[in-house]
Amino acid sequence: MSMSRTITEAANLLRQKKISTAALVKECLSRISKHDSKVNAFIEVQNEKEIFNKALEVDDRFAKGSFIGSLDGIPIAYKDLFCTSTLPTTCGSMMLKNFKSPFNASVVNFLEESGAIMIGKTNMDEFGMGSASVFSIFGPVYNPQSILFAENHLEKDNNKNIKERRIAGGSSGGSAAAVAAGMCFAALGSDTGGSVRLPASYCGVVGFKPSYGRCSRWGLVAYANSLDTVGTLTRTVNDAKLIYDVISKYDANDSTSMSPKVRSINSSIPSFFKSDSNTDDLRGLRVGVPKASITEYYVSELNDSIIDLWKKGIYYLRSQGASIVPVSCPNTRYALSAYYVLALSEASSNLSRYDGVRYVPNENDNLLYADTREGFGKEVKRRIMLGTYALTAGSYGNYFLQAQKIRRMIQKDFDRVFKRPNPLHFIKKGTSSIDDDGVDILLTPVAISTAPKIEDCLETNVSVDNNSSNFVNAYVNDVLTVPASLAGIPSISVPYGVSSIDGYPIGLQLMTQYGDEDTLLEVAKVLEKGAN
Amino acid sequence: MDESASSTSFNEPVNTNVSVIDAAFPGTIPRLNPKCIELTVATSLALSGNVQLVSSFDRKHYFYPDLPAGYQITQFYAPISLGGKITVSPLDGLEYEKDVRIKQIQIEQDTGKSIHDLRPGMALIDLNRAGTGLMEIVTEPDMRTSKEAGLAVRKLQALFRAIGSSDGNMEEGSLRCDVNISVHKPGTPFGTRCEIKNLNSVKFLMAAVDVEIERQIAELNKGGTVIQETRGYNVATNQTFRLRTKETYNDYRYIPESDLPPLIITEDYLTRIYNRLPELPDDRKRRLMSQYHILLHDVTTLMRENGGVEYFEEVAKDRNSRNVVNWITHELYGLLNIKNIKFDHNPVTTQQLGSIIDSIEKDEITAKIGKKVLAQMISGDKRLTPDIIQEKGWKQISNMDELETICKNIIAKNSEQVHQYKQGNKNIYQWLVGQVMRETKSKASPKLVNDILKKYLD
């Protein structure tokens, strides 16, 4: 089925001239027109004439035997917080409803230079603030699984799955849903605390968050700039690798881009796997599984079908030769609280530029400052308020500074657990710096459940008496993904099966030391093969 | 600080030097300008500051239309330089020597400019200078008089110009001062301070300090108290006035700027900057005085203009240095000032000015004609003195016979005055010289005229 075609397969067909770029684009567009009214993955789809012209240009080039890159002719979507000069960049917000950036994000440029074709901009939680992709002025993103299920089984609407509307997860829900529904071959998302990995798990696709600083943030509209990373949503790990290879370049426009010096130190440190090792032999690989998980990873919250699949994942990696090592990251239990203090503090700062002087919800209004902030949705306002509070003179020491200390402790936990030294504070001392007791990779679930029902996530359905605690409950969805975000380490969500209870997809999460994307992606490829 | 990919200039049309970073477009990330770091480090070294090998940046939040990001990037928690001092001494015109301690030097981002008086009811924003790096120097409360304060600022100006970190121009805003003032009785702790903002010349700064001191003393003598507040200075009324009190102070909600990694400075870098430091003002003053035998006053005047010393030293090569300094500080600076030409646009080359002095030396022209030649050059004449005087017929008359005839004529025509002179009214002599000069349109060699007149009169 066309929808499950990978980038590698499509690229091969293009090169063998068995299919045209125009046909690929047409496939995507027809799936968008068929399903997107129900999925709502896209905020804006590229003008049909324009995109076909572009596709024909590429096909003309192919006819002359000229291929400019690994993604030549591949339709890709961008979360609507990546600046693009041809389509608006709304961040899902009323505040930027009419905003068109004068420049492209660096990662968008990199992908275009390698021949990718932008098919549209995807729906998201406003400014990336949410775990469900329901906080968008363009409406919630619906999990495409029920639609796909109906399509695959040609069953009629008496199936429970079809009626039930579930969320796609957030905040990159539109990107995950678009990839899952075959509306594009890959999409960029952003991952601040799990915004790529969580929707990937809910929608049954691969969500990859590289190390902080690996991919340029220039042109990625900031939510929490010390945590924001560019992430990918693809159908396979190999596809994630193809995109990653193109976008993981140093960029002088981003002062936090991993410097060429660190990149060179990083590549001088041995990894378990080198890039593109393409072997299923995991003998010698040490896989860490958090012990005392009850406290560390909120296993009390995990539903059984997730624990089942996690166990299967552990057995599978062991069957491939890996040794399983129980590890302890004692400070992980504080990660969620620290994350929300830091992310919201930074958000309150980053969003202060939308002050109604330059960006206004309604262009004709001469509104005063406070009124212009009405351009923000409820969740964004809540997060700005919380973050502002955390930064006031009276609470900075109690909240922000403490959260920063916890962040540092979590980073140290990971440094202690991993065998490979952290290239950011790596001093060459022969080979003695490799810790033989350490692990190469960590394996955990991504989410505490499968995709929740949409009505449980919509603000309007939150019961009045329980209002104050409900939004905080939603933050718990990020509990398994924020540790990697705080530590800045690479992490990937790999679809590993479906829930025995509701049939919805479940992903497993792998994490490696900062800079060790090679091992992460190679092990993810193996894990993917064992998926149930 | 931020290499706002755009330059800044006082005279550029509004909003023409604005990058997407300056305007805080969504998705932009600031970058550090290496030149800004270099100049700040050089300034710190010149002020004996301790350059911090690790410093970092923070965001200071407040809402103002000319601050597009809603925060200013600054160095609140860990500035680039701590300590140091500004020494003000007799070399600077103070009667004694005084060290003004420096607390810290930090790098900050400039804001845009709000223009409130151009269109009624509207605040216009010019973002030209938004995002440009600026260096803030914070001193300790060590200055006791307006003179000390004024001279300390002048000292900094000279230093900035020497290093190239600023042209020090206060009117154009390339140097801005906020002054904190408090009064107290001897033996008691410092009083409550008031900050005076937006002072745009050293003269106004000194005047503002004086009237603020008077205001505070008067307030206390009335039995009142000084409250901590920010004040402005009205030049027209020579009074300070309240801008805002402490109750309305912002909570700036400082947060580390995670878009900019910590700034790491290596010892190698410091050494390189140190070795490249130019001659600093005090050393320069001492050297000029001893090398050229000119007065401190002349040196100070020379240094008032950026590049004045270099100009002087070029002209003074193989020439009488006192003569040269007079020509520059009196004639050249004076004429440029009258013509409203900045010294950095001075059209007179060192060869041109040198040629005037040489022609006078060689008795080809008088000093008075020399001034006319200089005026000609300032008007754009690119030629050297000999060519100008040749064409204009300004060459000095040094023909003995011609001058003798003229002198004899003057003596003959003014027998009454000659009589008085011989009676002992020696003052008449200068009048007679003047008559000869008038007759020759100032072209007569004063020395020859003197010789001839003396010969016939005495």
Image (tube, coloured by chain):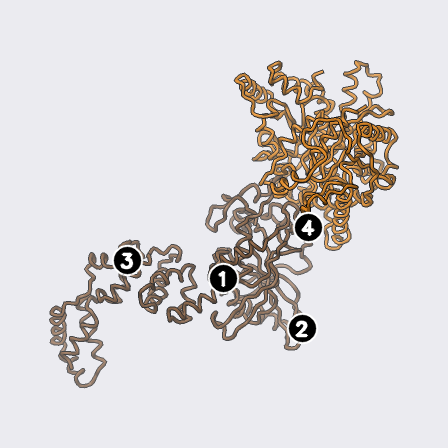
Chain colours: A orange, B brown
At a point 62% along the width and 45% down the height, the residue shown is B69
Relative to B38, B244 lies left or right: right
What kind of element bears circle 1? Answer: helix
Relative to B273, B393 lies left or right: left
What kind of element bears circle 2? Answer: loop
Foreground residue, B333 or A175?
A175
The answer to whether marks 2 and 3 sit on the same chain is yes
Amino acid, disc 3: Gln
Chain of the residue where label 2 is placed in the rendered structure = B
When asked about the image quadrant of residue A41, the answer is top right
The answer to whether marks 1 and 3 sit on the same chain is yes
Chain of the residue where label 1 is placed in the rendered structure = B
Foreground residue, B197 or A3?
A3
Contact between marks 2 and 4 (CB within 8 A): the answer is no
At a point 66% along the width and 77% down the height, the residue shown is B187
The answer to whether marks 2 and 1 sit on the same chain is yes
**Quadrant including the N terminus of chain A:** top right
Q: Position of residue A435 (x, y in %)?
A: 76, 43
The answer to whether marks 4 and 3 sit on the same chain is yes
Amino acid, disc 2: Pro
Residue at numbered disc 3? B376
The answer to whether marks 1 and 4 sit on the same chain is yes
Q: CA distance from mark 2 to mark 1?
A: 32 Å
Residue at numbered disc 2? B189
Residue at numbered disc 4? B255
In the image, residue A243 sits, relative to residue B219, either above or below, namely above
Query: Residue B378, which numbered label?
Result: none
